[in-house]
């Protein structure tokens, strides 16, 4: 018999049943071993090291009197050893229990499809292995690995518990009831547990950690009890040990799998709810991978920029920008098919990009990020080109790609325009790199498992293509070969895609970017990032939703509206420019899906090469609009952003013409197949857009509530400290984002007014960041961003503890080199209007530029009747002609003419009592020191128009007017008083 031979290897002997036992005993063993591990460790730990394990980083007994799980199980011998031995004993029943649940639900109770059953099986195994990770690798051994495995365990708990509840047999109401109770108990315990942990960690509340520990132990009890419920399901489920070589006459005959007479439902037909859950799970996973792609794309140029910034010239690392043309290899059809078929694997490999944060060497970090981006972008393009014969699948993938950009914006809003998984981020400056990578790995595994169980498409679902105009056509071209659509030019499609990709990257990878491109002086400053970033995100989301109307998005009238929005964005400032930017963003996002689909109907090699080269050339052009004087070819595009924006719209227009012809074909055939995929994708995109907008509202509300209200440091003395600092675009010497370290030193120096130079980071090469939002909200400052990004300067920015009455943004004369910027602001300083200038003159290559710029600054200062403070970057030595032109012609006093060791940064003043002057080392945040001056408001400013340079000792200065003592000697974190090695104080 065929059935018998499958067991006896052709011997004809029937198998023997050696023994059997109830599967419920596996549940019993698992429960006993697991509870014993934790409870015995608790008892032994309290008996042997009670006072040590209840102590935490802040408090001990009696404020804290109950130990946490980690302190009990991982800190002290012998409790740790007992726990680890018993957990090892638990692992056997645990693995068997996970496998039994798969067999029970897919082959006994038939409460799950095999596809979902396999998913739960993998989740259960990953969860079990990760448990071993945090049990046997303590935080003392390897803190990072311990945390990652713990996060993986907790992340897997959600799908495991919900999946088990969902697949529980409905004919066992007792088990289902207990699972629902324990799942509810587990997840409702999390919020108070997190609350008390924050009370302990942030607010240092005595006893909070003990309360937290009780919630933590409750999770253990609920977690183990949840799996113990399987004993109720396994009452009629047995394990058997069979000898298949044959045996005695009493052997029980066995049949092979699938020969049971019990009827089973068709596994490939999932219940409606299950199908929806699978679709949602897949959509969320792929959106996260799209977010990872946008994170890598937006970080590449930022990493590249570090090198010419420090070399002050072409470094050679700029060649990494060309990694974006990697998709041209998809012209090799077998490679394209492999990458599309195993896209989850290639997405997993691309995580070398986000993982590059582990490399300390900047060059290695850039190399790894470029490799990751090359893999990611090629995988996305392979997915699109292999799905081009399937309208629904392709549209779903492109919508997900766009949704990833929206998520990228929301995440950056939450992190004050930084991205927590960028390679310039790490734990010390607010990065969540490890968590981001773990989620990405889970998303990749979900894609791998889903693709393994669900084919990308079937012959019945294959769509028509422009080269296959009849439903019965089976040409290889229509099924994904290298098409060559004669009705629309491949180069027009490539131009359109390159243009729209650049548009989205340059202006819409941060919700505040278009605000900084159009910002103006007070009082017509324009919208603030919070809350108006919500409007930007909503406009992009609206554009993505409208994209499904191909007839609208490819119409000439709609293109004209987009062109007008771009024009307003280019030439208007403040609110009007922002409104134009919203229209431009709405339009760009709405046409992106049509332009993306248009490229898939053409040969991959030349289309992708051309499209991404157009994108690269636009990236280079946008850099050349602000090119330093020493940059080759700088005059060609310097100060010509309007040329770049015009080129974008013309390129998009080419793509629209190509997409319009394709849309006509789509309408002709009414999208006869994959309607269920199209409807599902659009429905999920609508829901996801709602979540994105609500998320941005909640983030904006939280930031508004938590923002510190501006207030000066020493109001009683009516004093203020002003500083000038060139911060090199908020990248430190080791290529890490530096705003957290900037925050610390600014706070410790008690700076009331700060001029920050080389501050305009709203460009592709700076990651579209606005780190000033973080400083302003965390320390309590008003912000003047300075001349907008559209004004082609490298940026000067002012933070002020005092209200800004008015400000003007100046573009200083620069007939040869790059434009120099200046802010002239009037502040309400304790009721006295005081004028400030923050400026950055041009480079030393052209003396004439600097002469004209200094002349203009002197004119502005001389024309004001208010007390004045100058904070600027002048590029001259003291006592040189430009020095005298600035201070004498500007009717200003140098803060200390005896300080001969200056070249770039200077502080000047008049009409104020000068108290002190100090120079503080940069601490490797940049290559330029911090210069500071302390001043007091006086009743008669005219009496203090000219300075007295008589110095006094610090002991003669009131304590509230002294500089902090922490920066004396060695200082802190590399910041110390240098040059004079101490502050200088003056009579006035």
Image: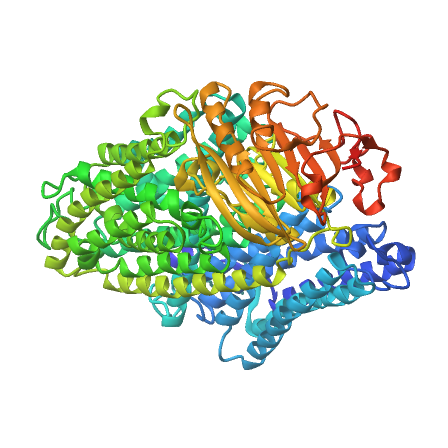
Query: Viewed as shown, does residue 545 lie left or right of 703?
Result: left
Quadrant position of the N terminus in the picture: bottom left
Nearer-the-camera pick, 590 or 929 = 929
Quadrant of residue 202 within the rendered picture: bottom right
Query: Viewed as shown, does residue 28 lie left or right of 525?
Result: right
The residue drawn where x is 25% and y is 54% is: 458
The colour mode here is rainbow
Q: Position of residue 468 (x, y in %)?
A: 11, 48
Q: Let me know if residue 241 appears in the view.
A: no
Query: Viewed as shown, does residue 681 lie left or right of 129?
Result: left
Quadrant of residue 691 within the rendered picture: bottom left
Q: Let me know if residue 657 appears in the view.
A: yes
Q: Position of residue 467 (x, y in %)?
A: 11, 45
Q: Position of residue 732 (x, y in %)?
A: 60, 33
Query: Viewed as shown, does residue 934 lie left or right of 460?
Result: right
The residue drawn where x is 88% and y is 58% is: 60
């Amino acid at each position: 018999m065929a059935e018998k031979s499958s067991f006896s290897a052709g011997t004809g002997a029937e198998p023997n049943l050696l023994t059997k036992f109830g599967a419920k005993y596996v549940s019993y063993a698992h429960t006993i071993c697991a509870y014993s591990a934790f409870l015995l460790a608790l008892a032994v730990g309290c008996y042997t090291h009670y006072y040590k394990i209840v102590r935490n980083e802040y408090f001990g007994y009696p404020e804290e009197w109950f130990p946490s799980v980690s302190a009990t199980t991982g800190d002290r011998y012998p409790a740790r050893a007992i726990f680890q031995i018993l957990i090892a004993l638990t692992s056997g029943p645990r693995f068997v229990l996970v496998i039994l649940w798969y067999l029970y639900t897919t082959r006994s109770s038939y409460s799950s499809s095999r596809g979902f059953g396999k998913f739960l099986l993998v989740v259960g195994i990953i969860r079990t292995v990760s448990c071993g990770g945090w049990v046997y690798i303590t935080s003392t051994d390897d803190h990072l690995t311990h945390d990652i495995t713990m996060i993986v365990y907790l992340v897997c708990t959600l799908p495991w518990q919900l999946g088990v509840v969902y697949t529980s047999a409905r004919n066992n109401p007792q088990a289902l009831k207990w699972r629902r109770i324990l799942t509810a108990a587990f997840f409702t315990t999390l919020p108070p547990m997190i609350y008390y942990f924050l009370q302990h960690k942030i607010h240092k509340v005595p006893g909070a950690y003990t309360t937290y520990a009780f919630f933590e132990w409750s999770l253990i009890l609920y977690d183990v009890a949840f799996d113990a419920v399987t004993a109720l399901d396994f009452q009629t489920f047995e394990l058997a040990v069979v000898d298949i070589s044959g045996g005695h006459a009493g052997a029980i005959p066995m049949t092979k799998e699938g020969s049971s007479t019990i009827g089973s439902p068709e596994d490939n037909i999932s219940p409606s709810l299950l199908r929806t859950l699978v679709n949602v799970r897949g959509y969320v996973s792929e959106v996260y991978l799209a977010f990872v792609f946008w994170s890598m794309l937006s970080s590449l140029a930022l990493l590249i920029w570090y090198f010419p910034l420090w070399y002050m010239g072409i470094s050679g690392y700029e060649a990494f920008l060309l990694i974006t043309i990697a998709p041209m290899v998809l012209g090799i059809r077998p490679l394209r098919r492999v990458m599309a078929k195993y896209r989850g694997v290639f997405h997993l490999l691309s995580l070398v990009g986000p993982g590059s944060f582990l490399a300390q060497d900047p060059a290695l970090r850039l190399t790894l990020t470029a490799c990751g981006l090359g893999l990611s972008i090629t995988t996305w393009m392979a997915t699109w080109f292999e799905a081009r014969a399937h309208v629904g699948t392709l549209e779903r993938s492109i919508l997900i790609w766009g949704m990833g950009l929206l998520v990228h914006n929301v995440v950056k809003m939450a992190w004050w325009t930084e991205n927590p998984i960028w390679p310039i981020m790490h734990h010390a400056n607010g990065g969540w790199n490890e968590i981001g990578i773990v989620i990405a790995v889970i998303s990749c595994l979900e894609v791998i498992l889903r693709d393994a169980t669900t084919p990308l498409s079937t012959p019945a679902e294959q769509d028509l293509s422009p080269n296959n105009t009849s439903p019965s056509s089976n040409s290889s071209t229509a099924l994904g070969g290298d098409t060559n659509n004669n009705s629309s030019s491949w180069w027009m499609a490539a131009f359109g895609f390159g243009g729209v990709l650049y548009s989205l990257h340059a202006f819409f990878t941060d919700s505040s970017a278009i605000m900084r491109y159009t910002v103006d002086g007070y009082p017509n400053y324009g919208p603030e990032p919070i809350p108006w970033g919500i409007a930007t995100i909503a406009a992009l989301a609206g554009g993505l939703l409208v994209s499904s109307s191909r007839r609208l998005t490819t119409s000439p009238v709609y293109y004209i509206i987009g062109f007008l929005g771009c024009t307003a964005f280019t030439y208007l400032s403040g609110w009007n420019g922002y409104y134009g930017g919203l229209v431009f963003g709405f339009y760009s996002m709405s046409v992106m899906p049509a332009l993306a689909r248009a490229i898939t109907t053409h040969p991959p090699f030349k289309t992708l090469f051309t499209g991404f080269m157009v994108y690269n050339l636009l990236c280079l052009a946008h850099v050349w609009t602000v090119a330093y004087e020493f940059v080759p070819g700088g005059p060609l595009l310097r100060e010509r952003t309007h040329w770049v924006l015009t080129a974008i719209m013309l390129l998009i227009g080419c793509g629209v013409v190509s997409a319009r012809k394709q849309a006509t074909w789509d309408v002709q055939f009414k999208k006869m197949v994959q309607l269920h995929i199209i409807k599902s994708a659009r429905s999920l995109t609508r829901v996801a857009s709602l979540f994105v907008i609500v998320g941005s509202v909640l983030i904006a509300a939280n930031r508004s509530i938590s923002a510190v209200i501006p207030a000066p440091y020493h109001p009683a003395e009516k004093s203020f400290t002003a500083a000038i600092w060139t911060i090199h675009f908020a990248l430190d010497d080791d290529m890490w984002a530096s705003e957290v370290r900037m925050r610390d030193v600014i706070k410790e120096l008690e700076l009331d007014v700060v001029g920050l130079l080389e501050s305009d980071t709203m460009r592709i090469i700076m990651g579209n960041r606005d780190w000033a939002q973080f400083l302003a909200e965390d320390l309590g400052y008003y912000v003047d961003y300075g001349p907008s990004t559209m004004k082609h300067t490298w940026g000067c920015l002012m933070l002020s503890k005092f209200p800004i009455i008015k400000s003007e943004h100046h573009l200083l004369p620069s007939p040869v080199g790059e434009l120099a910027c200046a802010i002239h602001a009037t502040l309400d300083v304790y009721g006295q209007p005081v004028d400030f200038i923050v400026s950055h003159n041009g480079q030393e290559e052209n003396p004439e530029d600097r002469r004209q710029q200094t002349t203009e600054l002197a004119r502005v200062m001389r024309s004001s009747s208010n007390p004045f403070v100058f904070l600027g970057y002048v590029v001259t030595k003291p006592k040189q002609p430009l020095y005298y032109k600035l201070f004498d012609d500007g009717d200003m006093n140098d803060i200390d003419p005896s300080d001969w060791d200056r070249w770039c940064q200077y502080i000047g003043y008049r009409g104020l009592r000068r108290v002190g002057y100090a120079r503080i080392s940069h601490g490797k945040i940049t290559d330029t020191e911090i210069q500071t001056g302390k001043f007091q408001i006086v009743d008669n400013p005219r009496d203090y128009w000219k300075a007295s340079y008589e110095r006094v000792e610090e002991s003669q200065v009131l304590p509230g007017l002294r500089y902090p003592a922490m920066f004396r000697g060695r200082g802190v974190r590399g910041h110390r008083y240098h040059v004079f090695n101490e502050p200088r104080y003056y009579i006035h």
